[in-house]
Each structure stands twice: as C-alpha cells, then as structure tokens.
Image (cartoon, rainbow, N blue to C red):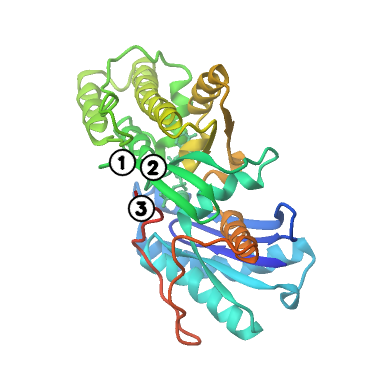
Amino acid sequence: WRVLGFESSCDETGVALVECREGEAPRLLAQGLHSQIEMHQAYGGVVPELASRDHIRRVLPLTRQVLQSADLGLHELDAIAYTQGPGLAGALLVGAGTAVALAASLGLPALPVHHLEGHLLSPFLSADPPQFPFVCLLVSGGHSQLMRVGAVGDYELLGETIDDAAGEAFDKSAKLLGLPYPGGPHLARLAESGRADAYALPRPLLHSGDLNFSFAGLKTAVLTQARKIDLQDAQLRADLAASTQAAIVEVLLKKSLAALKQTGLRRLVVAGGVGANRSLRQALDQACARRGVRVHYPELALCTDNGAMIALAAAMRWQATQAGQPSQPAPTAPAPAGSFEVRPRWPLAMS
Ligand code: ATP
Ligand code: MG
Ligand code: FE
C-alpha cells in the first residue's frame, strides 16, 4: 500500500512517498522538500500570500522528482494524503487542491491529515521507533503540548501553552538578538559559545502544578535584558542566547518529567522543530536515563515540516483502521466529489 503525501501548511513544500505492508513498519521510499525560508527572511517572518504562490510553483516539480527517485509512476499509488490543517489557509489550499485533484483523476482516495499528528508520529520513521503508549512533547513553531498517546488516533491533551509556543519563544528572542528568521537554530548555535547562567531569566509556570506552558513573559524578560547590554558585544549576545535557551529547555524538561510522573509512563517522544535542539535533547537524555525512561526523537531532518510525516500519518491511520481501531480526530465528513476544505484552526487532542 503506497501513499503520496503533501505538506503545505506554512513555509515548506513537502512531498513524500511512504509504503506500508500489514504487520510491518511503514517505510519512506522518497521525499522532496522545498523550504521558503530564504524568501521570507527579508520580511523577518512568513508572508502568507508569498507562501501560497511559492507552494504553487514547487508542488508539481517536487512530485515528479519524488516519483522519479522512487522509480514509480502515478498508477502505482494507492492513496494521496495532504495536510488539511492547522496552518495558513492559502498555503493549505495548494497542497489540498493538488492532492484532491490528483486523487480524483486517478480514482484514488484523498486522505486529509492533521499536521500535528504528522509531527507526533514522525519518530516512527526513525531508526529507533517508539512503542505505544507514550508521553509526547510536541514543540513546534506554533504549538507546545504534552499529550498522552495510547495508539494511533488516541491522543489525550495533558497540557499546552497558554500563549507563545516554544519555537515562537526561540524565534522572537532570536529576533531581539538580531538573528535571522527563523531564529531557533541560529539562537542555538550562538548559545554554544555563551554562559547559560549569565542572566537570570524567568521560568514561567515552572511550579504551576499543571502541565501548561507560558513563554510570553520570557520574551519580555529577554527584551529587557537586551536593552541593558551592548548587543554589538559578541560574548554578551552569546550569553543572553545561552541563558534564553536554558530557560526554555528547563521548562520543557521539568514539565515533560512531570507528565511522565503523572501518567506513570516510561517512554517519551519528542516531536516538532524544537525537537532538533541539541541542548534540549541532551537535557532530556540525561534526566530520562537516570529515571529509566526511553526517549525517542524524529530524524533531525524530519523535526521541522516535511511531506514524509504526512504520508506516514495517513499510512499509520490506514493500518489502524485495518486493525479496527477507532481514530481521533474524527475524520471530516466526506466532501462532495471534487470539492474539499482546509481547516486553518483545528485542535488535535482534547483534554
Ligand atoms: P506548527 O507545526 O505548530 O504548525 P511549524 O510547522 O512552523 O509550526 P515546525 O516546522 O515544527 O513548526 O518547527 C519550526 C520551529 O522550530 C521554528 O520556531 C524554529 O525556530 C524551531 N527550531 C528548529 N530548529 C531548532 C533548533 N535547533 N533549536 C531551537 N528551535 C528550533
Ligand atoms: Mg517551517
Ligand atoms: Fe509544523
């Protein structure tokens, strides 16, 4: 069973081909990705209209390239998956429109996928895939959540951010330090030469007793510090970067440990762009090793948006349905033939 997946929720056009056989782990056959980061950098963030237009330019060439590198033709596919939401409406429409049109022309099912389910299942394509059940720390550019994951389609929200996402905290702080968009990886690199204890920054909600996050106050604290120091001084900038990263990492670590404790689970899965952060991985690996907890990550290249996770999520859902498992979020009511809808706002799990 082969599924072609399209991702276009934000500023990455992703196309990928995943194969799955009953009783076997799904395999990635080929993938193509085009990032629009350079295009948006001049504006310091994603410009939605430019994003949609670029998805249109890239999606078909990428599709050809993926099929070619897998040495497969369109008639050898079994389903077409696409990100239905959440994300930018105009950007989502490109992937969805392409997928639905392609599926209709080939007589194949078009499968809508929740973007966050893609992120959350992406570690199943790694060399060390997890087993259910587990706690998932999903930390991306738009979301920060802790979930209890019982199976494909069995997601319970344990806690989430009440304001900014972790990736947003990285990006906004990085911007204050004069780093290019998206700032997360740049801030992480700068932090390597800084002292993490140079500045005392707040750890919001660290002792709130629940599993929610808040990062908006941290950004304000970084701004206050940034105004006090000479940002031309490379060492001071690195120190502030390292202190910022340490604050975010400590909150993510402590809340993840609290979620493991609360659920009694001994397996942690990290997903989303911030999951690529080395300092976060080190902190989680160390703390979890001490507690006998296994930690699983996506391959570095699959932490941020990609088509592979969308094709994978569709494939795993298909497998779960074959096995008679219920699935959540509930599939959308089937659209009239040839039409479709996107869901720019769409929660994955309920608490
Ligand atoms: P969402 O999935 O919530 O809709 P998104 O798709 O924009 O948001 P992702 O693609 O999962 O988010 O991740 C992008 C985010 O990850 C950005 O905020 C980026 O700065 C951050 N990020 C990527 N690499 C790193 C890193 N090494 N350290 C910290 N942050 C990082
Ligand atoms: Mg992106
Ligand atoms: Fe994403």
User: What residue appears at the point 39 percent right and 40 percent down from the top-left corner?
Assistant: 167
Q: Is mark 2 within 8 Å of ligand 1?
A: no
Q: Which residue is mark 1?
A: 161
Quadrant in the rendering for residue 30: bottom right
In this rendering, the count of numbered labels is 3
For the residues bearing labels 1 and 2, Cβ distance under 8 angstroms: yes
The local crowd at label 2, few if under 14, some if 14 to 19, many if 20 or more residues have their Cα within 10 Å, is many
- Kindly identify the amino acid type of the residue bearing the numbered disc 3: Met
Instruction: Give me the residue at 35% from left, 49% from top.
Output: 45
**First of labels 1, 2 by sequence position:** 2
Q: Nearer the viewer, residue 1 or 237?
A: 1
The amino acid type of the residue labelled 2 equals Gln
Amino acid type assigned to the residue bearing label 1 in the image = Thr
Q: Is residue 36 visible?
A: no
The residue indicated by pointer 3 is 350
Q: Tell me if residue 317 comes above or below residue 261 in the rendering.
A: below
Please tell me the numbered disc located at residue 259.
none
The residue at which mark 2 appears reads as 145
Task: Mark 3 vs mark 2: give the one in front.
Answer: 3
Q: Secondary structure at mark 3?
A: loop
